[in-house]
Amino acid sequence: MPCAHLCPSETNDVVPEIEEASNAGNGAHFSRPSPFAFSKSHRASFSRSASMPKPLNLTFGVEIECIICFDPTTYEKGLSFGDGILWEQESPSPFHRENKLRTLLRRHIASVFESKGYSTYDLTSPGGDQKWSVTGDASISIKRGPRADEFLECDIEIKSPALRFCPKALRRVERVVRILTRYFDTTVNNSCGLHVHIGNRRKGFPIQTLKHFSMLTALFEHQLNALHPAHRIGNYHVKGPSAVFKGQNPWDTMQAIQRCESKEQLLLLYAKEGCLDRCFAYNLCPMVTGPRKTIEFRQHEATLDGSEIMNWIQLAGGMVDAMHGTRAVDLAQLIHTSAFDPRFTVPDLLLKLKLEALVPFYRGRLHVHLRPEAIWARARTKENADAKPQKPRALERLEELERRHETERLEELKRCKELDERHELERCRELEREDEEVDAS
C-alpha cells in the first residue's frame, strides 16, 4: 500500500481543528490513557547531550483495512451510471460486475463520511494526504462470488489525512471508525492489518533518531512482539528486525546501525539483495522513497475497536518521540540491563519510555511468544573463527525459564487429560448404574 499521507497542509480542513486541539492544552479532554500528558516529563526521562535535539512536530496517519459484507441488489441500479466514469466499459474479467458493485459500495462509504463532515477524495481522483480516502486493497483476502446468503464481500482500506499528534485528531479517527461500523456490516480477518505512519511534518527525522529507533526495535523485539498475536509475528509482510540481525551479538547489531552515516545506509541494512524491502514491522522506506518522510508501523493486527487504534497510534508516536530525546549511551545502558532479562516485559519498557499512561490498557492484552532466534552470537573474526559463541547469562536464564514453562504446560495438559479420562470413566459407570436400575424395575 502506498504511504500516502502524514504531512498536514496549512490549507486543508483538518489542520485548523487540530491546531485548536493543540492550543486547547495537554489532552485534558481525552477520555482514555494518553501519553500526551507525559510530553513534558517524557523529555526529561533520558539524559540529554549538551546540545538538546529540536523537539519534533509529530504527525500521524492511519490505514484501516477491513471487509464489508453487502447486499448487491442495493447497488444494482447504479451499474449503468458508472460506465466510462468509475470503470472501463469493457472488461474481460468474469467478476467485472461484482467489482463494479464493490466500487459503488466504496463510493457510498465515501458519501456517508462526507455527510458526517469528513472530506473524502473522489474515487476517480489520485488521492493524497489532505482528505480521507476509501479504496480497496488486493492483499485483503475476500470471497469471490456470492456467499450462501447471496451477499458479497468487499475489501476496504480507509486512509486518514495527515493529522497532528494530539487528542482531538485521535478522536476524529475514532469517530470515523464508529461511523463505518454503525452503517456497514464490517469484519476483519488475518489478511487485514492496521498501519500507522508517524512523521515530523515534511521534515523527516534526524538520522540519530532513526538509528536509536532501529536499535530499540531490534533489541527489544521480543518484548514488543508481546503486543501482537501469533499471525503478526514472523509474517512475510511484517518481518521483525531479527530477520536482518539474526545470530548477531547485540553490540555488533548496535554498531552496524550506529555506523550508518545516512538514512540510505540505514535502509540498506534492511534491503534484500540491494532492493529496499518495505515488508517490515517497522518500515523506514518512506523516509527516503517518498515526500512524506514517515515511519510506518505495520505489525498491528486489523481491528475496528477505536480504543485499540487510538492507543496503538499513541504508542507508535511515543516510541519515536522517546528515541528522539535519548542519548546513545543511555539507550546502550537500557539494552545492557534489560533487553535480555526474562523478567523485563512490555509494561516495564513502556515505563522506561515514559509511556506509563498506556500500561493499564496493554497490561491485560499481552501475548506470549517464543523469543526470536537470539541476537547474541559472538561476531566471528580471524582470531576466534573456531571459538564457540557464549550466551549471555540473561539469555541462559531466559531459555531455562522457557524450558520450565514448557514443562509446566505439558504437565498441565497431562493432568487435564487424566482428569477428562477419569470424568469419562465416572460417567460410564453412572450410565451403567442407571441401566441396571432400569432393568431391575
Image (cartoon, rainbow, N blue to C red):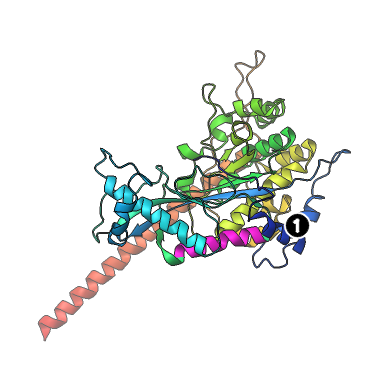
Residue lying farthest to the top in this orientation: 382
Residue at image mark 1? 38
Q: Work out which quarter of the rendered image holds the C terminus and state it.
A: bottom left
The answer to whether residue 363 is visible is: no
In this rendered view, identify the residue nearer to me: 390 or 376.
376
Residue at image point 48% right, 50% down:
122
Judged by its main secondary structure, the magenta piece is helix
Query: Against 76, is 31 above or below?
Result: below
Q: Residues within 10 Å of mark 1 (few under 14, many from 20)?
A: some
| Residue plotted at (73% across, 50% down) | 352
Which residue type does callout 1 highlight? Phe
Front residue of 93 and 243: 93
Compare residues 291 and 174 and report the one nearer the observer: 291
Drawn side of residue 115 relative to residue 433, left or right:
right
x and y percentages locating residue 302 in the rendered image: 48, 52
Q: Is residue 31 magenta?
A: no
Query: What span is colored magenta in the figure?
Result: 168-181
